[in-house]
Image (spheres, helix red, strand yellow):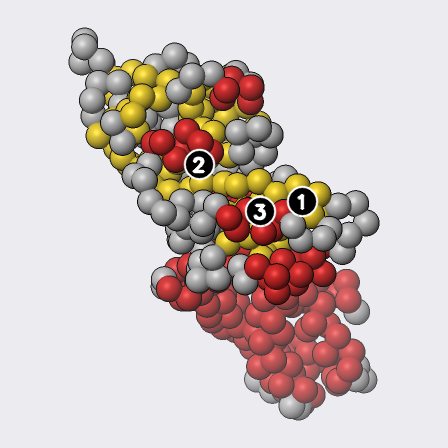
């Protein structure tokens, strides 16, 4: 009977393709918009994931996200180092500073300063140069993705030229020489990112009493990181977060303070509603057109549970096909834009969520059809 149900479904080619198209559009829109949303969210905390060395981030308790610069006194570094269980603790500077390109064009950049002695906190992937190049006089490192776009400038001939290793920049009227390039994940914030040593970052920035943005902490082997986090907070009065917790703090702030979740949520809901409406209406019309066949089966003694199973087989088969085409189209879209500035992140969890959404659509779409068939009188086959 299942095979007969599928033959009945495929036999009406127009409605069969119409149902599949509705489900494909729904799963494509749900997956694509949700993947773009997740991609944007991962960019909000990319600075944290690009700094994988520490187990804990120590900061002012009022910090709301990683770009919320609320500096601390340098003495907090030594207080953190004095907590039992800390293997190492190093300072980090992060702030927005004024920048001038080699032709004098003004910009604003994100300046990050890492520990002079260990260079802990640098990005993991270097494109040119090496971490030790940062020890050269006035040395800075730039993001390879920024050299042509955000840091590109017009040369004497009027053409556009990317900055290169050896070029001189001005950071708050202080000389900085590009000593290498690195690659990091694309960020939610659009300013170019420049790394240097902690002491040099302090020279590049306006002098203030408090300048240290974070303390990066590594736990000793065998030490429970969560307990160490609690010890640091209780003994120093500072806030301590693991990398994932700090990333979530940033993402949560963006979600609460912007309308990004609502905007993408509306798009996802629209895909669900449209898919339900198209698939439901088409599937209901298909059932109406085949009431005589269902009536004949009832007249021959076919039970309601068998007819119910037939309708569910029809609904689930088109649901599976529409789901596959939709998420496949979304994955193809993500592949085509992976080297662009557009955000896109498609984890397996999102595929599961889309699968549940499509399953809900086909169940809703089949409810009216099921009711119509179950209340059908077998005598309808003899009418007309």
Any part of residue 27 in sight: no
The residue at 52%/51% (across/down) is 76
Judge left or right: residue 33 versus residue 228. left
Tag 2 residue: 112
For the residues carrying marks 2 and 3, which lies nearer the camera in this image?
3
- Which of the two marks, 3 or 1, is nearer to us in this view? 3
Label 1, label 2: how many angstroms apart (C-alpha)? 19 Å
Whether residue 113 sits left or right of residue 246 in the image: it is left
Q: Name the secondary structure under disc 2.
A: strand
Instruction: Tell me what residue is drawn at x 48 percent, y 45 percent.
Output: 74
From this viewpoint, which residue is outermost toward the top?
Answer: 157
Numbered circle sitting on residue 78: 3
Q: Position of residue 228 (x, y in %)?
A: 69, 57
259, above or below 168, in the image: below
Q: Position of residue 119 (x, y in %)?
A: 56, 30
Tell me whether circle 1 and circle 2 mark residues in contact (CB < 8 Å): no
> Is disc 1 placed on a helix, strand or loop?
strand
Mark drawn on residue 218: 1
Which residue is rendered at x = 51% and y = 48% of the image?
75
- The x and y percentages for residue 270 are 43, 66
**Residue 212 in picture, x, y percent from top left:** 45, 45
Residue located at (72% from left, 67% from top): 313
> In the rendered structure, which disc, 3 or 1, sits on the residue that comes first in sequence?
3
Quarter placement of the N terminus: bottom right
């Amino acid at each position: 009977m299942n095979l007969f149900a599928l033959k009945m479904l495929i036999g009406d080619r127009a409605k069969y393709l119409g149902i599949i198209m509705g489900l494909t559009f729904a799963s494509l829109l749900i997956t694509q918009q949700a993947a773009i949303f997740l991609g944007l969210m991962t960019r909000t905390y990319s600075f944290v994931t690009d700094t994988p060395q520490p187990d804990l981030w120590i900061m002012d308790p009022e910090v709301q996200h990683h770009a919320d610069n609320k500096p601390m006194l340098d003495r907090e570094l030594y207080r953190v180092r004095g907590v039992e269980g800390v293997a190492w603790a190093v300072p980090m500077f992060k702030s927005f500073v004024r920048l001038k390109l080699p032709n004098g064009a003004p910009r604003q950049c994100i300046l990050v300063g890492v520990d002079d002695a260990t260079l802990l906190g640098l990005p993991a992937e270097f494109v040119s140069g090496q971490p030790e190049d940062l020890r050269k006089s006035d040395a800075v490192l730039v993001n390879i993705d920024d050299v042509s776009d955000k840091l590109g400038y017009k040369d004497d001939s009027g053409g556009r030229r990317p900055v290169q290793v050896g070029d001189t920049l001005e950071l708050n009227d202080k000389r900085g020489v590009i000593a290498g390039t690195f690659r990091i994940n694309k960020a939610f914030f659009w300013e170019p990112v420049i790394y240097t040593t902690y002491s040099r970052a302090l020279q590049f920035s306006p002098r203030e009493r408090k300048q240290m943005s974070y303390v990066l902490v590594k736990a000793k082997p065998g030490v429970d990181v969560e307990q160490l986090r609690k010890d640091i907070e209780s003994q120093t009065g500072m806030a301590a977060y693991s990398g994932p917790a700090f990333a979530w703090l940033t993402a949560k702030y963006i979600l609460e303070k912007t309308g990004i979740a609502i905007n993408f949520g509306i798009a996802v809901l629209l895909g669900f509603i449209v898919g339900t409406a198209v698939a439901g209406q088409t599937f209901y019309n298909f059932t109406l057109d085949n009431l005589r066949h269902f009536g004949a089966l009832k007249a021959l003694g076919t039970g309601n549970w068998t007819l119910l199973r037939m309708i569910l087989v029809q609904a689930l088969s088109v649901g599976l096909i529409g789901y596959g085409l939709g998420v496949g189209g979304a994955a193809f879209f993500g592949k085509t834009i992976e080297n662009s500035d557009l955000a896109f992140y498609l984890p397996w969890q999102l595929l599961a969520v889309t699968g549940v959404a499509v399953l809900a659509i086909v169940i809703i779409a089949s409810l009216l059809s099921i009711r119509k068939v179950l209340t059908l009188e077998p005598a309808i086959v003899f009418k007309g």
